[in-house]
Amino acid sequence: MKDETKQNSVISSDQDHHDASTNVINRRDFLTKSVGVGVGAAVLGSGLLTGVDSALAAEAKMPTTDWKTVKPGPRANDLYAEQSGFNDTDVTWWPGRNFSGVTIGLIQFQANLPMIPGNMGNATTFDFPMAYREMNAANVYDVMSTTPVKQFTDAAVEAAQWLEMQGVRAIMGNCGFWGHYQKAVQERIDTPFFSSSLMMLPMMVRCMPKNQKVGVVTANGPLLGEGAAIENCGLSLELMKELVVIEGLQDEPEFARAMAVQGAYNPAKFEQDVLKGIKRMLDKNKDIGVILLECTELSPHAHAVQRLANMPVWDYTSLTNWIHSGCVRRPFVGHV
């Protein structure tokens, strides 16, 4: 049986004679012969198939590439144009790239926290695929440091560079306080980096009617009020103090339990904490016209917030959907 297998792994035709010292089908020959064999290939015995597989495995070696040692290739030709047929040009690939077709990449904390639908870390939140890369940060709470921590920055950059290697078109953080690291990370990568939901704040402030303000609900009011994250996201401290109201949820019991990242929390009680904070903010500030939810854990409750407040509510998912729509435009179809 071993001899039969060995014979079956050899091209015996004189016309297609190979080096007698190897007598092994190489990958190109196998593909060439497969085209010519046609129907005959369907009746080959398991011995031949086993022999071919063994031969291919012995010859075709593909070493694993350390993605940190290479850089992404050019992206000029790796977008499929939505049209009838394909572009008549090569598409490109590079070592270290493991999948394709994902537009948005997310840097993910090592956080022991359930991520329910609506959370940035839950893939069912979006109608498009997301790529996630966990960052190896020694302390996730470093994200709240008003001065970037080097180890945290380095871990974030490494995660972002891996996402770049996979060909994503934009990279997201997953906490509003990522705004502290917008500049520190962006200057070291080559892909647009949208660190924080707070990046929407300058636009929201600019579009508000006269005498109306933006209400920002956050995981930590006093810390966000220091302004470093907001300023890094493009809004001056002067305008923040004039046109932004900040409401923190740090003292709400179920919210605090979730933020302790101990692996469990009650979403129903969490939502009641959120709505309690919203009501408190609106009762104290009658001039609020729109709401921005800073924390990604707040996004699953955006609908409930809008139902209570009866005004526009934006959050991290709003930003992500907007970015994706710009990266992957669709043709307009209709009648005139």
Image (cartoon, rainbow, N blue to C red):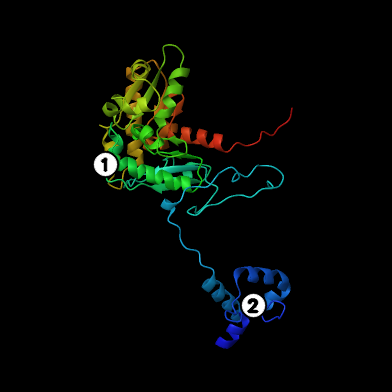
Q: Residue 269 placed where, x, y %?
A: 32, 38
SS for dot 2: loop
Question: Hey, which quadrant is residue 243 in on the image?
Answer: top left
Residue at image x 40%, y 43%? 107
Residue at image x 26%, y 26%? 222
**How far apart are labels 1 and 2 at the CA level?**
67 Å
Q: Nearer the viewer, residue 188 or 103?
A: 188
Residue for badge 1: 260
The kind of residue tagged 2 is: His
Q: State whether residue 76 is above or below residue 67.
A: above
**300 relative position to 28: left or right:** left
Residue at image x 61%, y 45%? 77
Circle 1 crowding by C-alpha within 10 Å: few under 14, some 14–19, many from 20: some
Residue for badge 2: 18
1 or 2: mark nearer the eye: 2
Number of numbered discs overlaid on the protein picture: 2
Earlier residue among tags 1 and 2:
2
Most extreme residue toward the top, as rendered? 210
Residue at image x 68%, y 72%? 33
Q: Residue 280 placed where, x, y %?
A: 32, 23
